[in-house]
Amino acid sequence: MTLVAGTKLGPYEILAELGAGGMGEVYRARDPRLGREVAIKVLPASYSKDPDRLRRFEQEARAAGQLNHPNILTVYEFGVHEGAPFIVSELLEGATLRGRLSGGPIPSRKAVEYGVQIGQGLAAAHEKGIYHRDLKPENLFITRDERVKILDFGLAKLVEPEAVPGKVTSLPTTPSVTEPGKVMGTASYMSPEQVRGEHTDARSDIFAFGAVLFEMLSGTRAFARPTAAETMTAILREEPKELSALKADIPPAFERLVQHCLEKDAGLRFQSARDLAFALESVSGGSSTAALPAVAPPEAKRRWAGRAAAVAAAAVIVAMAFWAGTRLGRAPSPEFKQLTFSRGTIEAARFASDGQSVIYSAEWDGKPAAVLSAKMGTPGSTLLDFPAQTNLLAVSPTGELVVLVHTTHEAGYIYRGVLARAPASGGAPREVLENVQYADWLPGGQELAVVRSQPREYTLEFPAGKPLYKTRGWISHLRVSPDGQEAAFIDHPIYGDDRGQISILDRAGHKRDLTPVYATAWGLAWSPDGREIWFAAAATGGNRLMRAVSLSAKERVLLRIPGSLALLDVSRSGRVLLSRDTVRMRLMGLFPGSSSERDISWLDWSHVRDLTPDGKMVLFDEEGEGTGPRYLVCLRNTDGSPAVQLGEGYATELSPDGKWAASLDFYQSPARLILLPTGAGETKVISAPSFEATWGGWLPGSQQLYLVGSQSGEPPRYYLNSLKDGSLRPLTPPGLRAIGPRPFSQDGKWIAMVGSDGKATLFPLEGGQPRPLPGLEAGEGIAGWSADSRFVYAYQHSMPVRLFRVNIATGARELSREIAPGSIAGAGASAHVLITPDGRYYAYSYSSMLSDLFVVDGVK
């Protein structure tokens, strides 16, 4: 059945045919309800002739529709048209992996990048009990922005065996009505258990994935034979050629990983796609000798396959090796000793000068940060006598501490406060330096290196008082080298974000970047010999590995375990102090139709950016493990309807008419603002000459755009942007910071800013004199304005959030409401808090991190 343009399938209007094959025809169509284009796959009418087959197809289609993951094709709807079932899905632009392979093998680094995404997509499906059973290059789609999408989940199970095995060539396959060699799968990519017609599970998909990865790396199929029957025989009895023999530059680590996927015995393969994705990420972030689970030689594998007990033992060993991130046959695996067992967040930790004790600061059970000490071999921790809300920064060789007091949350991951010195035994700290974020002792324990902040500018002083490096991003985890000649730190290019790279700075101010920018980087320390910097980072997602980089920029993987690592310290003897964190960003709120808060988070890091005045729609971005290397801009109805992906970037706000969402495109340099249509329309790019954007959106009730950033190297400020010629008109003086996510008044007359003196001020947008904004306390943000612009809703970022209604003329404050999730253990600072002008509805995001502190011996 061929559909012509203009044909209606329910509410959908067919626009054009995209392709056809044995699984039916695919069309481009338009959904007028949402003003978006979709893809519709109409399957052969023969599917509907067998009621049982149609029922199974519908069941599989609906199951696939439950998969909500950026690396899986999104299925919107299932239906039947004139007896033929059809599936409605997102419309993709790009090419299949088969098309990409027509140009030959894919570079190793790019193949692993694709592989990580495929593994993450498979893991999401497998966790819901859904297996693909026909993974192959034709079912993997590479979008124009290099995102991999797995196609046709739930369909492969319905493909019937072909009656006559035909000829299989080395040419790329193309969809056809009858593709020889399909027996519940495609011959070249079937697992041994599929060939034998046995039970299949997640490990069958892992075998197929290994065959796909083999082909990406070598340009050749792993089990290419003249006929389907010979191909299936090779899968059962033969080993694929050595990858290194087909392509000399393939690193050994890649080859071991592929071999591990292609084990004949399913019990000897990776046991989950999640484990496989972790292993791939370690390869992508490390050297060619990155640690991988060991793969035994073929002779040994065949011997083990005949011995059930030995197989079980080998599986345990492989699991232990994967957990510790080491190869079999290597030195003993690292030994972990857990020090903490409370519920909450560890902020920082250091080895004490005696080498046997650990000093750390943590927020346990929802209480303010406290400084504690723990001794290895002694149960429990001792609370040190410091004021509440004291955070550890560093410990000197003589045992003196530097701590942060009067801490305030600035933005994202950024906190600042007053640096103070104190004895390790506790007592009143002696305040020394304001506006400090991080600090570390120089050798000898007399001088300090510090990171200090001014509004939207961060300076590394080495030593304190000698500024050597400034950035409009931000700086974290400062550590001075053992010889005192260099300082290592994480240089974050995006204000408030944990994306960053490892950099070093010498005493003369010369800076070198040792690593690429990681999706997340958190915690570093110098190796015991001072020749490397050890750190925790992830190339994609949020599950950080422990890595090392030499001063000549050579990287390797040190340790990988499930979860996200934060490296806190390394002792002179090589002991490692780290935390394993479970991290989430939840999106909560009180919305129309509900008398209590509702969690409308999507994946693992849902950061709210805007809330419509009626409380019915939120704009947010996703930027965690679930989205891989990219940030997604999403729109969601607050009734809990599925999220709509608008595009990529760092969401900022919605236009007053709701037709556009603004997003910061930081993948470009300089960063720029882009406008994404919420319905039909084309993306618009907003740029100005020599302008580095850091934020942007619309003036209230207007179609006028504002941009935040710096022009030609000047300090950042707010500008009015002309859509006609891209010219900029300053709205605020330079160097000021907007107060919270809603600095503009509802009537569009004022913007609330704060300067380095901490005073809140209202600046008129149409000219005139600024005026004080009384009643706001230090560190508070503005969540919204009343409809008449006479009041602001002010809040601190700490949990629970206390929201005050403040009169902008008199400064009078009244508590409007207190906001908190059910449990605040591990709940960090709230991110944006937004409230509607009538004060009835609100939305907020907050970070949640539950940490366990470990001492690890044997990391090398």
Image (cartoon, helix red, strand yellow):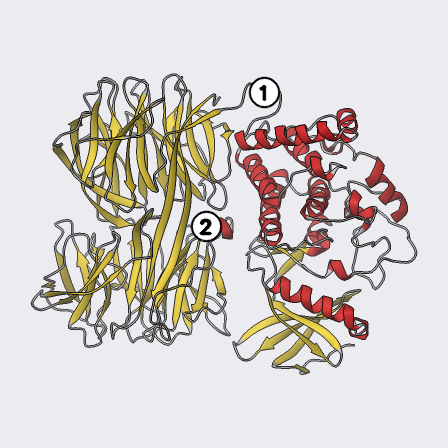
Residue 189 is left or right of residue 717, and the answer is: right
Q: Residue 654: x, y in percent?
A: 37, 69
- Residue shown at 39%/16% (left/top)? 573
Upstream in sequence: badge 2 or badge 1:
1
- Residue shown at 34%/27% (left/top)? 379
Which amino acid type corresponds to the residue marked 2 in the rendered image?
A: Gly
| Relative vertical location of residue 643 with respect to residue 625 in this rendering, above or below | below
Q: Distance between the residues labelled 2 and 1?
A: 33 Å
Q: SS of the residue at dot 1?
A: loop
Looking at this rendering, what residue extends furthest in the left direction? 810
Q: Residue 691: x, y in percent?
A: 34, 55
- The residue tagged 1 is 330
Which is more toward the observer, 70 or 77?
77
| Relative vertical location of residue 448 with respect to residue 41 in this rendering, above or below | above
Instruction: Give the number of callouts.
Output: 2
Query: In which image quadrant can residue 787 be found?
Result: bottom left
Q: Residue 845: x, y in percent?
A: 35, 57
Which-is-in-front pick, marks 2 and 1? 1
- The residue tagged 2 is 624
